[in-house]
Image (cartoon, helix red, strand yellow):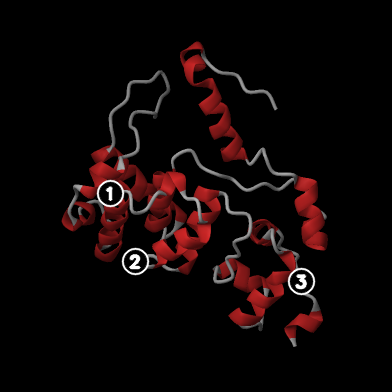
Amino acid sequence: MELSLSPSLEQVAERVERQVSLLLDLDADPHLIAAGLGELAQNNVGLRLPGCINRFELTVRAILGQLVSVKMAATLATRLTQNWGGVIDTPFAGLTHLFPTPERIAQLSVDDLRGIGVQAKRAACLIGVAKAVEEGSLPLNNMQDVTQGVKQLLAMPGIGGWTASYIAMRAWSAPDVFLGGDYLIKQRFPNMTPGKIARYAQRWQPWRTYATLHLWANNDFIPEEEAQG
């Protein structure tokens, strides 16, 4: 892969390179991961885990996406950015605002967010997360222990297992998170309880995040029959 930068980014070239690497999961070894996943990965060996540039933005988008369509979540994120994000002058059409900072969202009220269509409990959750990030009690950008980070997220009102696990996957590039409670994942395991699905997924350790991605992408997946009994 070749990365080209404009002259204006030369002073931060190393940082940009690292961010792109995280975004595209370039440090991963697809063949090693595929070997660990076996038959599940055989038709899509190069599948990688998409990361993110702004971990706080990813977290906010994950919360906004709870129990709404992808389109609605994107609309809410756009409204949030247009109302409270920083204005930026660029030569690119449509790129007019920076995503709001934790400090800015922490200053908002629930009614402010309700005004753009965010449900009240979700609005309170966003403000709580923003305050935790601002205060440093939730170090999204420097999470040393993913397991502890997930526990912190789960302790926050409004964040459940799916959201916490999704944040761990995308924001912290955690390789061994399985979204067994995801709707589509459950569809891949008909007539199996959540406990059985979780036990089945143990065969994919330590690459259960990638197993989740493969299951999302593989409409033809059929679990082994003996695991369904």
Tell me if I can see residue 170 in this picture. Answer: yes
Considering the numbered disc 2 on the image, is that residue within a helix, a strand or a loop?
loop
Q: Earlier in the sequence, mark 1 or mark 2?
A: 1
Image quarter where the C terminus lies is bottom right
Which residue is tagged 2? 158
- The disc, 3 or 2, on the residue closer to the chain's N-terminal end is 2
Q: Is the N terminus in the top left, top right, bottom left or bottom right quadrant?
A: top right
Residue farthest to the bottom?
229
Instruction: Give the residue type that dot 3 points to.
Output: Ile
Circles 3 and 1: CB atoms closer than 8 Å: no
Q: Residue at x 24, y 42 (%)?
A: 104
Q: Mark 3, residues whose alpha carbon is within 10 Å: few (<14), some, or many (≥20)?
A: few
Task: Return the disc, 3 or 1, that comes first in the chain's sequence.
Answer: 1
Neighbour tally class for label 1: few under 14, some 14-19, many 20 plus, Cα within 10 Å = few
How packed mark 2 is, by other alpha carbons closer than 10 Å (few <14, some 14-19, many 20 or more), is some
**Residue 44 appearing in the image:** no
The residue under the point 45% across, 58% down is 149
* Cβ atoms under marks 3 and 2 closer than 8 Å: no
Q: Nearer the viewer, mark 1 or mark 2?
A: 1
Toward which corner of the image does residue 205 lie, by quadrant? bottom right
In the rendered image, the residue lying farthest to the top is: 7
- Disc 3 on helix, strand or loop? loop
Residue at 69% x, 60% y: name it.
206
Which residue corresponds to mark 1? 135
Query: What is the C-alpha distance between the residues marked 3 and 2?
Result: 33 Å
Residue type beneath disc 2: Gly
The Cα atoms of the two marked residues, 3 and 1, are separated by: 46 Å
Q: Position of residue 162 (x, y in %)?
A: 49, 65
- Secondary structure beneath dot 1 equals helix
The label nearer to you, 3 versus 1, is: 1
For label 3, the residue is 222
Could you say where residue 124 lies in the image, as x and y percent from the top left? 25, 60
